[in-house]
Amino acid sequence: IHGYTDTKVRRFKDDFLFGAATAAYQVEGGWDADGKTESIWDRFLHSHPELIPDGRNGDVAADSYHKYQRDVEMLRELGVDHYRFSISWNRILPTGFTNNINEKGLEYYDNLIDELLKYDIQPMVTLYHFDLPQTIQDLGGWANPLSIQLFEEYSRIIFERFGSKVKYWITINQPNSICVEGYGGKRAAPGIGSSGIGDYLCIKNVMMAHAKAYRLYQKDYKPKYKGSVGISLALNWADSVNNNTENVEATDLYREFTIGMYMNPIWSNEGDFPPSVKKRVLERSLEQGFTKSRLPELNAEEITLLKGSADFVGVNHYTTVLISKSEKQYPSPSIEDDMGVEITFRTEWKTSQSFWLKSVPYGLYKMSIHINKVYDYPPVFITEHGWSTKKVLKDSSRAKNMREYLHALLLAIEDGTDVMGYTAWSLMDNVEWTAGTSERFGLYQVDFDSKEKTRTARLSALVYKRIIEQRIIEHDWKPKNLNISIT
Ligand code: PNW
């Protein structure tokens, strides 16, 4: 791509929003405080401590439930425009249902939101970031279509209470992680292991739940509050390993399974899941002796409800993978078998502390151009982008990764991508799901051994602050020391 050798200075416009993100389970702690009950992640890591390398689960985490004022102070130090955080369903509705609304839970988020607004930081609220009430899981969770209505009821309570203060909403974080890892796989909550069946049931219901919440806001809240509602999708880029036709075709299909599956229902002209995915899952299902496709259908009414059900696409972009047609047989039925691809990485790609996360900045550019071409330039909000390291303060690899990806983003903007803002994952170190705290994503380091859960700015925090101030990328800029303060 162009733009890597020229000397043109590219600038983020003044209205471009810079922010940082976290999620409730990963930072709050207070897992049973003030009436909060058990979510599927509480249950999952309580019952599978052996999965966590360092044994740290979300029981206490960074203790943001008690330290939110310090969190807002950090956001002020960075000079960000917005803070993306998620609400714990169990804090608000301890039974999972609307029969018992927990005022203490609402108060916590009210205080956080007021603290943000006091300093002119816009809250961006995620309604659901992986932590379903266990009571709902006991009824099948997202595999049960009842979950659609339950999510809508929960959303109404949140919109009622915070609608006047919050202008940016994310309904659901990463349907594919929720469903493919949680229902297809066994290593993320709820760990159902129903690959090729449960994952697809979940995807339909999660997408429908999103659409219902969007329509609810549009009808009852948008007219008075004028906020925007989006959904955050895990959109990593995939390139073919080479130009062989079979690999190029495998890559197209992989993109339809990982991008089209979630984008098409909302942003394509036809709506619905991608034709190639529907075709493949139907064929494989019939071969396997099923009487119909394992991928549930969307009927005309559902297609209409989903089409256009977002004001922007929340892009969570981390990395790029290489795709080839798979030579090996996967267990069937499974989504892996349905896709039939193999995933690799280029050895030159710099690797993080997470095995899946390599630094490939051009992938963000290519992803943006792909979205523009296929979905006709939808408004994009980067709702997550980040890098993992060990517990170090001089995290030059994170600073470099951020600069290079932001440069790629500037090129994507120059080529027409409509980007509203960028959100760094994460404001601070947190519980990285089953990885515990062994993979650190924070601009601020958290000392989990300390009672205070002391937060300390990393080098990357100072670099980010500088980018936000200057609105250009200075690849060689270095701070004199690691002190950070509010300016
Ligand atoms: C996101 N991948 O998940 C989640 O939204 C965060 O909660 C999480 O802490 C963060 O990324 C870092 O992992 C992802 O395999 C998980 O490409 C996996 C991938 C991408 C995002």
Image (tube, rainbow, N blue to C red):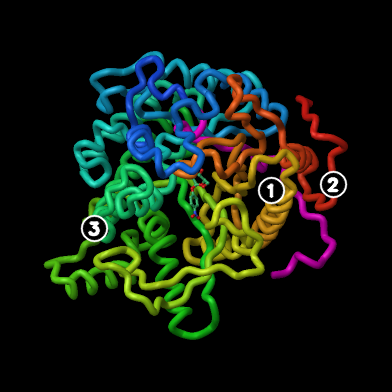
Give the alpha-carbon distance from disc 2 to disc 1, as whole Å: 14 Å
Q: Position of residue 238 (x, y in %)?
A: 51, 67
Kindly state the secondary structure of the residue where label 1 is placed. Answer: helix
Give the camera-side residue of 175 and 332.
332
Q: Which residue is mark 2?
A: 477
Residue at 18% x, 75% y is 287
Q: Which mark is residue 233?
A: none
Mark number displayed over residue 398: 1
Judging depth in this view, the residue of 403 and 483 nearest the camera is 483
User: Dot 1: within a 10 Å radius of its alpha carbon, few (fewer than 14), some, or many (20 or more) residues?
Assistant: many
Q: Residue furthest right?
A: 480
CB contact under 8 Å: marks 3 and 2: no
> Majority secondary structure of the magenta segment?
loop
Question: In the image, residue 168 lies at what x, y percent?
Answer: 51, 35
Q: Against 152, is 252 above or below?
A: below
Asked if residue 408 lies left or right of residue 161, the reply is right
Point out residue 236 in the picture as x, y percentages from the top left corner.
52, 59
Q: Residues within 10 Å of mark 2 (few under 14, many from 20)?
A: few
Q: CA distance from mark 3 to mark 2?
A: 51 Å
The foreground one among 195 and 161 is: 195
Q: Which residue is mark 3?
A: 197
* Image quadrant containing the C terminus: top right
Left or right: residue 144 versus residue 219 is left
The question of residue 102 being in magenta is answered with: no
Q: Looking at the image, is mark 3 or mark 1 earlier in the sequence?
A: 3
Q: Which residues are magenta?
A: 1-27
Q: Is residue 250 above or below residue 426?
A: below
Residue type of the residue flagged with mark 3: Ile
Q: Are marks 3 and 1 in contact (CB under 8 Å)?
A: no
Where, quadrant-wise, is the N terminus in this rendering? bottom right
Q: Secondary structure at mark 3?
A: loop
